[in-house]
Amino acid sequence: MKRLAAACFLAVPLVVAMETKDYEAVSLLGAKLVPTAADAAALERYEKAKADFARDPSEENTIWLGRRAAYAGRYREAIAVFSEGLDRFPGSYRLLRHRGHRHISVRQFAKAAADFEKAAALVRSAPVEVEADGVPNNASVPLSNTQFNIFYHLGLARFLAGDWARAEAAYRECLVWSKNDDSIAATTDWLYLTLRRAGKAEAAAKVLETIGPNMTIIENAAYHRRLLMHKGILAPEALLGPKPDESEAELRANAAIYHYGLAQRELWAGDKDAARSRLEEIVSGAAWPAFAQIAAEADLARLLLEPPDLSKPETLLRAWTAFWNLYDLEAVTALFMPGDEATYFSSEIAGLIAGREALVEHHRGFGFVPGGQARDGRLWLEDVRTRVDEPAAWVTARWLFDRDVSASTPAQRGPATFVLVREAATGAWRIAHAHFANDPPAK
């Protein structure tokens, strides 16, 4: 009876989650993300994992059910599986490790970091534990351990949030658990990127000292090549061309990793336009769960505000969406009309909000901070219609706000209206008035 009850308890929220949302995640740029159809083999393994769980809802079978759901593109379902498992196994650092991974997939960086931080505290007294691969490498030899995966993904969650100092700490801890050249290459690559983003060029050069062309690499060849480029052994243009030990399929799969490394070089050189163009190319790809694409998305969202492109109404609204998803209080000054000219009706409070200072305080009340911070809610616009009559433009749209993408709760939504004005002196469009309302409750 206990096993049957556990299985029944799990089935209910998963059905609800699948019925109420037509997306697995929403990007920082406001795009709904839907996975491609899973192949037959992935679905077969998923069905087997469900049968194994129904027979025995152990910690191990819970982990594999969640992992197989994720490999089939069902990331929110995977999170629900791991969450239900943590209700039964609250001390499981393994469940926390896997749930944190899938919080990264759906762009919930704060929740991911919280899971990995808790897992890190729990795993410190545990022996090194080899982690089985969900998709075996060519040698069919698992190369990572649970400790490595906890600190590796913790570093990534912090990197994606732009928390360079704490990402560095996680990756340096991860190096302790990197027991082979593959793990060393993967960890060192992200550590190097982190140090460069933090402005620590000398420290970054130091971590490359252990990297060489003769390392034994089985599955992280793309990271290894990126490191060789950073070290100057491999030319940047060589990353994108054909390689004798890389098939065309592998080159396509690794393209985002290579392009992201090149985009980082452009950022370090101060060429934001080139970096932005390359990041746009990465983000347009279909492999949105890949770490390189998520990182490109996070960088691009920040670049949209550094400074925002106010040359057209659509670019202004794109920057406004990034502003909301990054919670960057400083962007209020750039996006809205100065002084007392900007006005705002909120869907959450009564009365007119007038003037930029009042708008700053209004957004501060929603958790916006200077420089932004990782938050897990997502806001985006749909059905956008724009009418331009220089020097003004009128925009009507549907706004949606999903406070928890991974939950089954539907997004809050309602109509929105923007009045934009082009400044004569600069040619920049800014928001003169915004009005948000909630849809009436369903009867």
Image: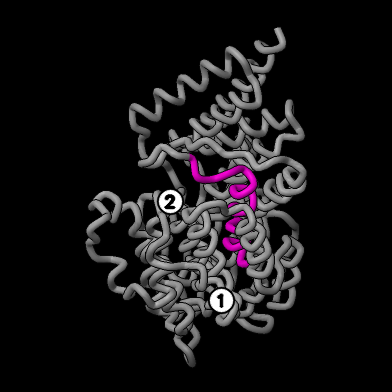
Image quarter hosting the C terminus: top right
Q: Nearer the viewer, residue 419 or 94?
A: 94
Residue 153 on the magenta segment: yes
Mark 1 Cα-neighbour bin, 10 Å: few <14, some 14–19, many ≥20? few
Identify the residue shown where x is 47% and y is 78%.
267
Total labels: the figure holds: 2
Q: Residue furthest bottom?
A: 425
Lateral position of residue 259 relative to residue 23, left or right: left
Residue 83, percent from left and from top = 67, 33
Labels 1 and 2: the sequence-earlier one: 1
Answer with the quarter of the image where residue 251 lies. bottom left
Q: Which mark is residue 288?
A: 2
Relative to 325, is 440 above or below?
Answer: above
Name which residue type carries label 2. Answer: Trp
Identify the residue shown where x is 71% and y is 44%.
119
Q: Which residues are magenta?
A: 142-162
Q: Residue furthest top?
A: 1
Relative to 350, is 206 above or below?
Answer: below
Where disc 2 sits, the SS reads: loop
Q: Which mark is residue 206?
A: 1
- The colour style of the image is one colour
Report the mark closest to the observer, 1 or 2.
1
Identify the residue shown where x is 61% and y is 26%.
60
Residue 353, percent from left and from top = 71, 68
Identify the residue shown where x is 67% and y is 17%.
6
Q: Is residue 414 visible?
A: no
